[in-house]
């Protein structure tokens, strides 16, 4: 019974505003599904959605590969070294997204540190455009998402019994074979969990694409904000927000068919 | 922080309800205590204190300092009403939301003229009272039913004097000519000014820019798209130039002086064909201080000397013709309404923008993405 007020709080503060958004999507500017029809008639919307999905997929792939390498080396270190690595991962985890975006601007800009070094050393004649484009957005997003990829993987890898690998080696399997046939399958839940986490968080990215994309990488979150604040087309914005939300739920549902979602995010069975 | 804002909002509406008799005294006192505001005035028996002030909704940063030195301090001296600030930026969507929610916490917003026209039409604003606010103290054509221009801001481009020493660019046609003037460009990300610049570059004369031929403007923008980066805030525009990312960059005029100083004069402002944007002071419907008070405030911002102070402090150009002749010599070059500039700038048409901002902005975003 004690959870009833909490439940009420969630309904009032969370469910009602979300329902309101769903409602705006079919009631602004007039009742009907005209906003959803735009998805089929307005090619720009499809382009924005595709940009968002493409950027998020590449971010997810790279972050999880890098995160896997980091987590793998961390579980194979002991004591102090492991703590040091964890501290470094967490420090970058805590630095604000704005600070990180501006740091990349300073490092990778046309007159930034890296370009200055490349040009003065003669490795490149012209400064390379590393930011203010999709490549810059990807660098910023992957850098932001790596810690999110590391943490679920680390938790998963720490739970693996290392005697299994010893058993595999003693039965004659080489190191590569042991990794591919034993270790990798055992870390599958971790890989799925971190991919899911990274992808879902990436979908809502706003600041990084806005700053590092130079205005040319328009993702859904920024587009929604423009439609709410500047053009005041709330129906269109609500429709896209609804689409994003249902996309996330659909992903979680598909995953739940294959595994227990609660366990991925740390709930004990 | 969020909580404090929330309670402050509550107290403001509470004061209104208390005044109109919808809320009991005890509830209001309780609310004030929660919010930590105005308790002293409540004890003194002045329960309306929370509502008896002018809240100016602006964009933060230097605006607070400059609005105080130019407008706020003098108004408080004259009327006894304190001027407070909401610095969250009165974007059209936010103003609409505030009025729709019935919880209006701002009295006057330092917004765009096209916002005043669009929101006036949709019934979200109070009418400007021209028996208090003086139409003669506004450049002709820039006082509307639901908003009045106090200042102009504007868009213009700056160029690298080192790169283009012998033949400096002076028109939008030069800006869009990347063959004759090689190098990167920067434009505003949300279409304003960029579309006008593109049309002038394409050979449209200043008086024919409005109503805008969107497709023509977009095509021109596309022609330099691969050489152009886009900025969303004034500081970003400034940074792109100061960091040497572009050889010509569009800026908000109020930033131009700082950029020239930051680059030791390497980048110079070109005022020819600059686009003058009328800002508008507008009043959200049902503002807490009441219509009479806020009209007095707006009228007090029309005083020529005060408008010169806002130019000096914030780089915003006066809209009161009396002030045009008073612009100090060192600022004349940066002011859209100074004698030397007024005839060569393009005056933005907020009525066109109010009607077309949705399609114009979305087409533009589609083109640059």
Image: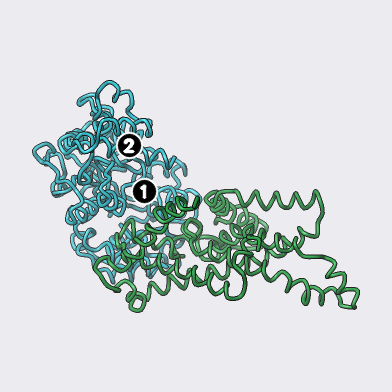
Chain colours: A green, B cyan
Between B236 and A164, the one lying in front of the other is: A164
Q: Which residue is mark 2?
A: B85
- Tag shown at residue B269: 1
Q: Quadrant of the C terminus of chain B?
A: bottom left
Q: Of helix, strand and loop, which one carries label 1?
A: strand
**Count of picture labels:** 2
Judge the density around disc 2: few (<14), some (14-19), many (≥20) Cα neighbours within 10 Å: many
Give the residue at x 81% y 50%: A79
The image quadrant that residue B259 belongs to is: top left
Query: Label 1: few (<14), some or many (≥20) within 10 Å?
Result: many
The first of marks 2 and 1 along the sequence is 2
Secondary structure of the residue carrying tag 2 is strand
Q: Which mark is residue B105?
A: none
B42 sits left or right of A136 in the view: left
- From the top left corner, tell me how far across and down residue A74 is, in percent: 76, 58
Residue B318 image offset from top left, x and y in percent: 23, 40
Of residue A197 and residue A262, the one placed in the foreground of this image is: A262
Left or right: A224 with respect to B28? right
């Amino acid at each position: 019974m004690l959870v009833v007020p909490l439940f009420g709080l969630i309904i009032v503060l969370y469910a009602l505003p979300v329902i309101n958004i769903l409602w705006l999507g079919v009631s602004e500017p007039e009742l009907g599904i005209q906003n959803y029809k735009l998805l089929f008639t307005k090619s720009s919307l499809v382009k924005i959605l595709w940009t968002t999905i493409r950027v998020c997929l590449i971010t997810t792939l790279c972050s999880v590969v890098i995160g896997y390498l980091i987590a793998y080396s961390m579980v194979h270190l002991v004591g102090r070294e492991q703590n040091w690595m964890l501290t470094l991962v967490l420090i970058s985890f805590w630095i604000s997204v704005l600070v990180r975006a501006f740091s990349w601007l300073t490092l990778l800009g046309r007159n930034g540190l890296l370009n200055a070094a490349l040009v003065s050393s003669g490795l490149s004649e012209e400064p390379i455009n590393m930011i203010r484009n999709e490549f810059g957005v990807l660098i910023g997003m992957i850098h932001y998402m790596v810690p999110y990829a590391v943490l679920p993987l680390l938790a998963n890898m720490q739970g693996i019994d290392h005697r299994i690998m010893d058993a595999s080696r003693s039965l004659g399997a080489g190191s590569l074979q042991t990794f591919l046939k034993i270790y990798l399958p055992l870390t599958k839940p971790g890989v799925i969990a971190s991919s899911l986490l990274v992808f879902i968080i990436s979908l809502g990215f706003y600041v990084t694409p806005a700053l590092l994309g130079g205005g040319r990488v328009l993702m859904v979150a920024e587009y929604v904000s423009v439609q709410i604040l500047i053009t005041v087309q709330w129906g269109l914005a609500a429709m896209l927000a609804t689409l994003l939300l249902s996309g996330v739920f659909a992903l979680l549902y598909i995953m739940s068919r294959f595994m227990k979602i609660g366990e991925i995010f740390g709930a004990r069975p | 922080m969020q909580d404090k804002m929330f309670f402050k909002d509550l107290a403001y509406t509470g004061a209104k309800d208390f005044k109109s008799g919808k809320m009991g005294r005890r509830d209001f006192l309780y609310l004030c205590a929660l919010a930590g505001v105005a308790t002293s005035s409540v004890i003194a028996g002045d329960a309306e204190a929370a509502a008896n002030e002018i809240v100016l909704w602006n964009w933060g940063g230097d605006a607070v300092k400059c609005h105080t030195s130019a407008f706020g301090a003098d108004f408080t001296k004259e009327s006894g009403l304190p001027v407070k600030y909401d610095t969250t930026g009165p974007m059209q969507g936010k103003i609409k939301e505030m009025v729709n929610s019935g919880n209006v916490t701002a009295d006057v917003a330092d917004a765009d003229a096209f916002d005043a026209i669009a929101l006036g039409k949709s019934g979200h604003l109070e009418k400007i009272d021209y028996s208090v606010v003086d139409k003669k103290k506004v450049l002709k054509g820039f006082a509307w039913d639901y908003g009045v221009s106090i200042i102009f801001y504007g868009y213009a481009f700056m160029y690298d004097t080192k790169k283009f020493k012998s033949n400096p660019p002076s028109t939008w046609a030069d800006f869009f000519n990347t063959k004759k003037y090689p190098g990167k460009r920067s434009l505003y990300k949300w279409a304003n000014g960029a579309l006008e610049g593109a049309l002038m570059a394409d050979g449209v004369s200043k008086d024919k820019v409005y109503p805008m031929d969107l497709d023509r403007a977009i095509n021109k923008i596309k022609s330099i798209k691969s050489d152009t980066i886009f900025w969303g805030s004034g500081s970003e525009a400034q940074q792109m130039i100061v960091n040497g990312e572009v050889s010509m960059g569009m800026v908000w005029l109020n930033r131009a002086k700082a950029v020239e100083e930051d680059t030791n004069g390497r980048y110079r402002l070109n005022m020819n064909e600059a686009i003058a944007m009328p800002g508008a002071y507008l009043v959200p419907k049902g503002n807490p201080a009441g219509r009479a008070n806020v009209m007095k405030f707006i009228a007090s911002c029309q005083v020529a000397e005060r408008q010169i102070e806002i130019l000096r402090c914030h780089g915003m150009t006066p809209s009161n013709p009396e002030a045009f002749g008073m612009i100090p010599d060192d600022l004349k070059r940066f002011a859209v309404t100074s004698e030397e500039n007024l005839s060569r700038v393009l005056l933005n048409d907020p009525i066109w923008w109010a009607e077309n901002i949705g399609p114009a902005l979305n087409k533009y975003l589609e083109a640059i993405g």
